[in-house]
Structure formats: structure tokens, C-alpha cells
Image (cartoon, rainbow, N blue to C red):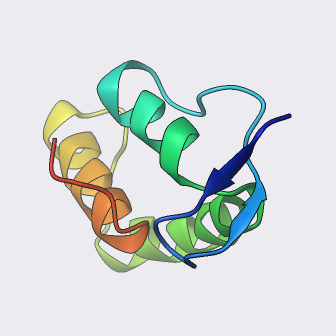
Amino acid sequence: MSEVTCARCGERREGLGAAPLPGALGASILANTCATCWEAWRLEQVKVINHYSLRPHLKEDREKLYEITRDALHLPAG
């Protein structure tokens, strides 16, 4: 796997092997997030989904989750 300079932690670390989500957001995560920060977010994401009572199968809730994901990983707005 290649290394990336992570937007979240600022460190140069091992990146992800593949985009974890489809589309532009997945590509941005792949290019700008290290595997360590992605795993930390993946675990935190469950708490976010429960806190906001999000239903990711619904488009509007998925968009809200993607917005929170961008903020948490310090990615540009998409």
C-alpha cells in the first residue's frame, strides 16, 4: 500500500488499499486519510449514527453522515 499525508493527523503513514466508499468522497478518503485514522473514524462512526439516529440506507441520512465524515477526517467539502 502507498503512503499518504493524512489530512486528519498530519502524519505520513500507510494509506488504505482501496476507496472505502464509492464516488468522490471515497476517492478523497483514499488520497487523504491514513489507515489508522480511517479505522478510528470507522469505530467512531457507529456512535455518530446512534447519536443522530441516522439511517444510512436513506439518502438524506447518508448525506448527513458523509458531511460528518468529511469534517471528522478534515477533507474538503464535496
Vertical position of residue 62 compared to residue 27: above or below: below
The quarter in which the N terminus is drawn is: top right
The quarter in which the C terminus is drawn is: top left
Q: Residue at x 35, y 35 (%)?
A: 25
Q: Residue at x 36, y 32 (%)?
A: 57
In the displayed structure image, the side of residue 63 where residue 8 appears, left or right: right
Q: Toward the viewer: 33 or 49?
A: 33
Q: Residue at x 22, y 56 (%)?
A: 67
Which residue is the extreme one toward the right?
Answer: 1
Would residue 54 be visible to someone looking at this image?
no
Q: Toward the viewer: 29 or 54?
A: 29
In the displayed structure image, the side of residue 46 where residue 53 appears, left or right: left
Vertical position of residue 41 compared to residue 56: above or below: below
Which residue is the extreme one toward the top?
Answer: 23
Q: Residue at x 29, y 69 (%)?
A: 71
In the image, residue 26 lies at what x, y percent?
45, 32
Which picture quadrant has residue 69?
bottom left
